Image (tube, rainbow, N blue to C red):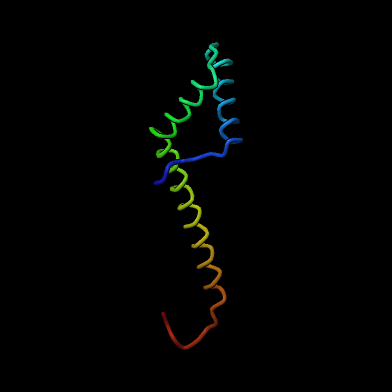
Amino acid sequence: MTDITFTADERAILVRRIQGYFSEELKQRIGQFDAEFLLDFVGREIGAYFYNRGLYDAQAILGRKMDDLQDAILQLEQPTEFSR
């Protein structure tokens, strides 16, 4: 897996969200540098767990769609003397 990267705008949003969480939930102020450091840490140390969960969810959705597609194709099958 390559490193998770965000645009400058995305990082700014995430940093503000971290700062907001610390302020509202923990009643602590956290500066921009510390929030960026925390964002980098979370991405590096636990980001892969969230990334993998997203992959598992995508695989499950794709599997269901493939089953639906297979059913749709079978419904198009015309009767013949051949058996499966």
At x 54%, y 21%, the residue is 32
Q: Is residue 12 above or below residue 62?
A: above
Image-quadrant location for residue 17? top right
Q: Is residue 58 above or below residue 76?
A: above
Q: Nearer the viewer, residue 48 or 76?
A: 48
Q: Which x, y percent locates residue 58?
A: 49, 50
Q: Nearer the viewer, residue 51 or 16?
A: 16
- In which quadrant of the rendered image does the C terminus lie? bottom left
Q: Which x, y percent locates residue 74?
A: 52, 73
Image-quadrant location for residue 47? top left
At x 54%, y 72%, the residue is 73
Q: Which x, y percent locates residue 65?
A: 52, 59
Q: Is residue 14 above or below residue 2?
A: above
Q: Nearer the viewer, residue 68 or 42?
A: 42
Say whether residue 24 is left or right of residue 52. Answer: right
Say whether residue 48 is left or right of residue 8. Answer: left
Q: Total number of numbered labels?
A: 0
At x 49%, y 56%, the residue is 62
